[in-house]
Amino acid sequence: MAAGALTASLLGGNAATASPYPDPGLEERIATTLSLPTPPGGADVRVLVFHASAGDEPPTVDAGIAAIEKIGLSGPEAGRFKTVATDDAAVFTNGRKLGRFNAVVFLTGGGDVLDPEQEAGLEAYMEAGGGFLGIHDAARTEPYSDWFTGLVGARPAADSPTAVQRATVEIGDRQHPATKNLPLEWKRPDKWLDWKDNPSGDVHTVARVRELTYTPGKSANGWDHPVSWCRDYDGGRSFYTGMGGTAASFAETDFRDHLRGALAWTSRISQADCKATIDSNYTAERLTQPNQPGQNDQIGEPHGLVTAKDGRVFYIGRGGADSSAPVVTDWSSPDIGKGNGEIHVYDPATKKVSLAGKLSVFGNKGGGDELVKVEEGLLGIELDPDFATNGWVYLHYTPHAKIDRDKRMAVRQVSRFTFDHTTNKLDLASEKVLLNWPVQIHSCCHAGGGMAWDSKGNLYVATGDNNSSGFSDGYSGNNPQPNYKGVSFADARRTAGNTNNLNGKILRIHPEDDGTYTLPEGNLFTGEEPDEGGGKTRGEIYVMGVRNPARISVDTSTDTLYAGWVGPDAGAPSTTWGPAKYDTFAAITKAGNHGWPYCMGNKQPYRDRNLPDPSKPLGWYDCNAPKNESPNNDGLVKLPPVTGNTIWYSPQGGGVDYPRDASGIPSYEVEDQKQLLPWLKGGGQATMNGPVYRYDAASTSGAKWPSYWDGKWFVGDFYDDTQPRHAVLTDPKTVGKGGLPTHAESLKKIIPVGANGIRNLMDWKFAPDGSLYVLDYGRGFFTSDSKSALWRVTYKGGGPTPAAADLARKAAAQ
């Protein structure tokens, strides 16, 4: 027994023999006779360490008791407590004794250690508002009790590994007192339990163990392997950690800090939110109804949304019509591709939708091959930072009036319009064109479209590479040969890889009040570079080398840019041409080249090709010193070095990587692959970048997502199977430098997937009230249908616990 600990002699008796079949009415009778205070314990905080075992006492007991006692006697005075240790289960039927304890720790072995009356007493203690901390083998205690299973949260799989292994623990909760001071990636040895049933979504997981870093055995849980969690349970507070399987664990400073925080919450010294990742605490509500026949009264072909400070939601339709409308694909017709880019407004105060306006766009050619379909149209929307005062709305679109049917060229532009707050209409006559550039429209695809503001009033505009997906077997879009009247449509070196072309970029400009723009400092180019004779750069370019960035966002707390772009079509890697299709997300902290069409992922190169025979592979691109030697290039030959990306995924998995040879070229052999990010996988795939959530403590909104999500980046995909719909954490030390996320968690039950959920994610933004608005594209392509809809996801779990009035010591409140 640990020296100095108050022991079982204070409580008397020995551990009782438990029965697996308690009397159903017993718990109610025990609760009546125990006379427990509500909540148990007081300002003189006491913690009971219960360490009975049905077999031999685990070797962790003495070390665990000593560690908990030391925790209670150290640190700030407001967080200290007294420790009592016992193996006598009779305490759970003695209300006077049990009621003195703010929290109970189960440092138990496996098996039955409570008889029916004693388990009923523990239930009554929790119902009175008590706290519970289970450590490691506590999950094997009371194996026949459904109630105890709920208390600990999960049961270990029978064939869990027994060896001590060093592994990496991902800390997902940066606010709970049990984890807020721990490393983002915590490397430590322990015995790692697998779970018979994964508790994620039913409990609030604060930490996960990364299975890639150890051997989890046959019962592995996969990338989502909770190791510590908590929840409000049956009137009280329950925290469980699967760590602490070795005596040495209790000597670790970080593990003791973990226990200190868990005990602070369970003993009512500190508040914490243990509800934020429990799926049932969220409600997803469809806001718009199916359109009336032949009308787009509720929604167009969904393509983007933005929220105003007053709560209204502006969302756009790209230009594809519903199935009842005719589609013109004949280039001899002046109406080819003509569609309506629509701007709808949802008002949460009235719960009604209005049509603010529509633009005539080139964007309605229906489906088909790449010489028929089109992705142009109304592509992006943003509201001016002073929208409430000036009513300015920025639209990124392809006006039908400016197409050249002979050359099959069009103009893409960013225009400012004025919204009339009185009539809820867009004044189309108020248009001021800020920026425009040419795009080829002979062939689909890759228009991009997203826009976002930073804190300095700079507007970011995402543009696609305006390139066909064909003619390169799904690898680098670098075939210089196909063209229409001299304009290449299959060579992204003409666009994304060109320093003198605005396609395949993320632009950054500063709009001025007179409808012009200036260039902020820090873009990739100034537009005045003298290199290679001069005149070969555009100063609007902030990021080059992106393929189809439909969605971007800026976290105005840090001005970090977040972007996602769709990759090419190759389903598998090629030792001749390079990596499979990678869809990509990047956290971007400074101007740079993100690779396309030269390199993808973490600087994995493609093979070059050129005239006279593009079918013959040339050398591998040098990601550190790429060159654009395309005959379609009118920009610099020597390009900025490629910056590695944050997240990439293919049909093979997430974060695919390979061993590299002495020249740094990956093997691209399927059998050599490893997945650095096992929580996502592609197939059909189309990235939909999301926001970074920022919690507003001053907001009184009852719908806002909790502070747990503060600083987390939401990444998603149009599809809803193995593709991402996750919230991720990044390391501030490596963000923007190609560092991988340190933690990811699924949102697929909170933002529901499936036929009756939000199956085809098109855009998602948080509103000022902290609720999340989501666009579901619908179930078709290049059109809207009955499933096209605006949704809202709200939180209903309530605030942190215990209530401020129930804190053991008011001065210790977090």
Image (cartoon, grey):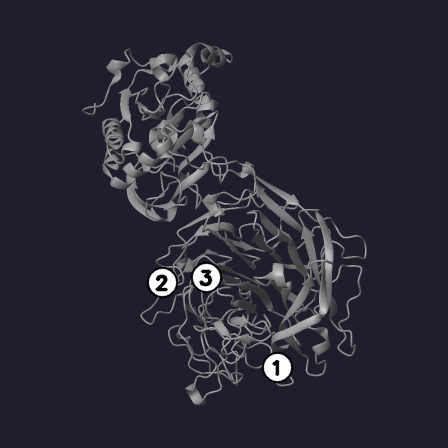
| Residue 70 spot, x, y in % from top left | 23, 31
Q: Mark 2 points at which residue?
A: 659
Q: On residue 377, which mark appears?
A: none
Give the secondary structure at mark 2: loop
Q: Which of marks 3 and 1 is nearer the N terminus?
A: 1
Q: Earlier in the sequence, mark 1 or mark 2?
A: 1
Question: How far is mark 3 from mark 1, CA to CA?
Answer: 39 Å
Q: Mark 3 points at which residue?
A: 559
Vertical relation: 22 (above or below) 692: above
**Amino acid bearing label 2:** Pro
Instruction: Please rate how many residues cluster around mark 1, counting C-alpha atoms within 10 Å: few if below 14, some from 14 to 19, many from 20.
Output: some
Quadrant (top left, top right, bottom left, bottom right) of the C terminus:
top left
Q: On residue 483, which mark appears?
A: 1
| Residue 254 spot, x, y in % from top left | 28, 41
2 or 3: mark nearer the eye = 3
**Amino acid bearing label 1:** Asn
Q: In which quarter of the image is residue 626?
A: bottom left
Question: How far is mark 2 from mark 3, CA to CA?
Answer: 35 Å
